[in-house]
């Protein structure tokens, strides 16, 4: 499990498939457009145990500088509809695709504090090539806040996670892998 004080994060495999599918559809539908996809993470948190079960694609627009700007009304509508269907789940954070954390990600992260005071950030790196060790191209980050000389700064820190599946998920993932 995680170190003392750290979260115990359990990522369900359908989340991985959903993020990968979202990215694949984004680049195939608009090959010359932005290669970034954004979405919300939903699940349950019980104390320090966090279980990420679902994702919802997030509406955003790109500014003239190419930075994503979330469409707040659309995001809140999606969250409301999702919470009606899954009343026990809460918004745990957000995900993005990219090869690295971008400076604007901290701005987006701050916007998500409206929905969760300590949101998680999952970054899917579509360029990551596994070395045969079956590494997933996903990194989960927590925000760590530092106070030095009365000045507050924050940074994204990688957080360990465990992929956890129930029987139905194992069957689904096995089937999807065979079809692919």
Image (cartoon, grey):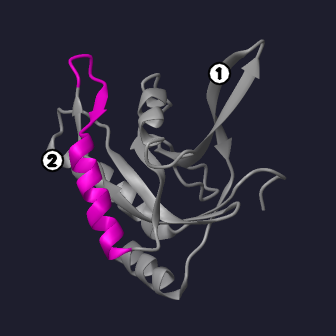
Q: In 3D space, how far apart are the residues under numbered discs 1 and 2 (Cα atoms)?
A: 38 Å
Dot 2 surroundings within 10 Å: few (below 14), some, or many (20 or more)?
A: few
- Asked if residue 128 lies left or right of residue 172, the reply is right
Image quarter (top left, top right, bottom left or bottom right) of the C terminus: bottom left
Which residue corresponds to the image point at 31% horizontal and 43% vertical from the top-left? 37
Residue 180 in view (yes/no): no
- Which is closer to the viewer, label 1 or label 2? 1
Seen from the viewer's position, the closer of residues 49 and 27 is 49
Q: Which residues are magenta?
A: 63-86
Secondary structure at badge 1 equals: strand
Secondary structure at badge 2 equals: helix
Which residue corresponds to the image point at 43% horizontal and 27% vertical from the top-left? 107
Which residue corresponds to the image point at 82% horizontal and 52% vertical from the top-left? 3
- Asked if residue 155 lies left or right of residue 111, the reply is right
Q: Which residue is mark 1?
A: 153
Rendered location of residue 4, percent (x, y)? 84, 52
Rendered location of residue 134, percent (x, y)? 59, 59
Marker disc for residue 100: none
Instruction: State whether residue 97 is above or below residue 12.
Output: above
Q: Indicate the quadrant where residue 45 lies.
A: bottom right
Residue 23 in view (yes/no): yes
Dot 1 surroundings within 10 Å: few (below 14), some, or many (20 or more)?
A: few
Image quarter (top left, top right, bottom left or bottom right) of the N terminus: bottom right
């Amino acid at each position: 499990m995680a170190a003392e004080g750290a979260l115990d994060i359990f990522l369900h495999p359908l989340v991985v498939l959903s993020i990968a599918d979202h990215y694949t559809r984004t680049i195939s539908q608009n090959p010359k457009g932005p290669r970034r996809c954004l979405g919300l993470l939903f699940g349950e948190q019980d104390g320090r145990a966090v279980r990420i079960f679902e994702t919802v694609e997030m509406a955003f627009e790109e500014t003239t500088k190419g930075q994503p700007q979330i469409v707040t009304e659309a995001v809140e509508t999606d969250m409301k509809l999702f919470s009606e269907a899954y009343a026990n789940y809460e918004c745990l954070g957000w995900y993005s695709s990219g090869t690295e954390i971008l400076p604007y990600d901290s701005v987006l992260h701050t916007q998500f504090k409206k929905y969760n005071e300590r949101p998680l950030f999952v970054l899917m790196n579509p360029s990551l090539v596994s070395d045969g060790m079956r590494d997933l191209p996903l990194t989960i980050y927590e925000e760590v806040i530092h106070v030095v000389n009365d000045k507050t700064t924050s940074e994204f820190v990688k957080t360990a996670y465990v992929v956890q599946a129930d029987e139905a998920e194992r069957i689904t993932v096995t089937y999807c892998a065979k079809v692919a």
